Image (tube, helix red, strand yellow):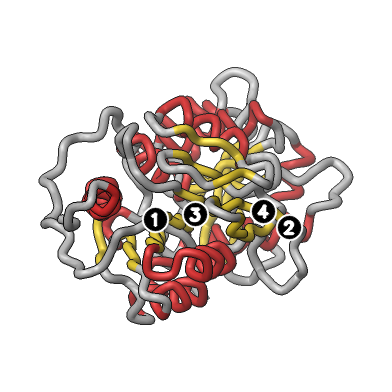
Amino acid sequence: MERVEVLVVDDSAFMRRAITSMLEAEPDISVVATARSGEEAVAKALQLEPDVITMDVEMPGMGGLEAVRQIVARRRIPIIMVSALTREGAETTFTALDLGAVDFIAKPDAAYVNIRDVARDLVAKVRTFGRRQAPPRAPVQRPAPPLEAPPPVRVARGPFSCVAVGTSTGGPVALSRLIPALPANFPMPLVVVQHMPLGFTKPLADRLDAQSKLHVVEAAGGEPLRPGEVLVVPSGRQPALRRRKDTVELELHPDDGRSLHVPSVDILTSEVAEVYGPAAIGVILTGMGQDGVQGLRRLKARGGYVIGQDESTCVVYGMPRAAARAGLVDRELPIDAIPQALVELGARTEGEREGTPGA
């Protein structure tokens, strides 16, 4: 069996041992070296060229961000950040993803309360990236380079009233390409499910809000869905939509244990399908697994429209691939072309409001 070779970087000896133990419990993973500083990480990455690197965010001397910057500039090695469950940790992690890190995990707590969840998450991601199923990315460049506009949307449906967006691995970067590119007068609400640890969805929403013309917030529950606003479903809660007179509100509920993901793309897209029917749009972005397939199947059955991110711009072409293989994707596009497609679909909504045919 060919093993995935990993370099573990952390300034804490305890954490280096903990992460090494998690990985070496698996017969197909081998920790070939550890490093306790950014300088040591860069040197060993260039010398050993491991399949995957796990990188601590905060270290004395050269920190994780600068180490990521230097490694990505010289080698195409996937880097998984190990992030503290704090707002500062989340914000630094999002910066690392912009610099070219491929993903992140939550750092185990000192009491090892979450050790099984962290170990499962870490092993799955190391296997995915170590087997080269997901190539490393180049750093994000802002502003995004102009792309040739996609062909006009040709679909004899509409108007549309709501967009449900689902994503997982690679999602923070994909969302930073999608939502800030939408205009201030975008005529539909968006509801977003992003798989991530507890405490990370609010910093994500705040970061997107600062970058965007639309107003982006982490949902608290009970908010009406309004055109031009983006609600991010918080980690640890499941979404539900309820129509009340002339408005639709987003409710949040504890997980009932039936879904692997909390929140779940399947649940979100099912809820949007039930409330909006043929006026619903589903957008499935980069991520491992197949969350979203069942919900998008319901959305399609109700007459909705589905856009999938293409393989070339996904960090992991898992969720979009599963939806496409199930025949649920009407249009597959690179991430930077999806905003324009949504604008074109939204023009149908504006046309209907003005009493004119959609485009």
Q: Are marks 2 and 1 in contact (CB under 8 Å)?
A: no
Q: Is residue 153 left or right of residue 235?
A: left
Kind of residue at badge 1? Ser
- Please tell me which residue lies in front, 357 or 163: 357
Is residue 46 at least partly visible in the picture?
no
Label 1 element class: loop
Horizontal and vertical percent position of residue 48: 46, 46
Q: Are marks 4 and 1 in contact (CB under 8 Å)?
A: no
Find disc 3 in the rendering and name its residue: 169
Q: CA distance from mark 4 to mark 3?
A: 25 Å
Kind of residue at badge 3? Thr
Check the picture and name the quadrant holding the C terminus.
bottom left
Q: Name the residue at 60% across, 28% down.
A: 37
Give the label, 4 or 3, closer to the camera.
4
The tag on residue 251 is 4
Find disc 2 in the rendering and name its residue: 253
Q: Name the residue at 35% across, 56% down.
A: 314
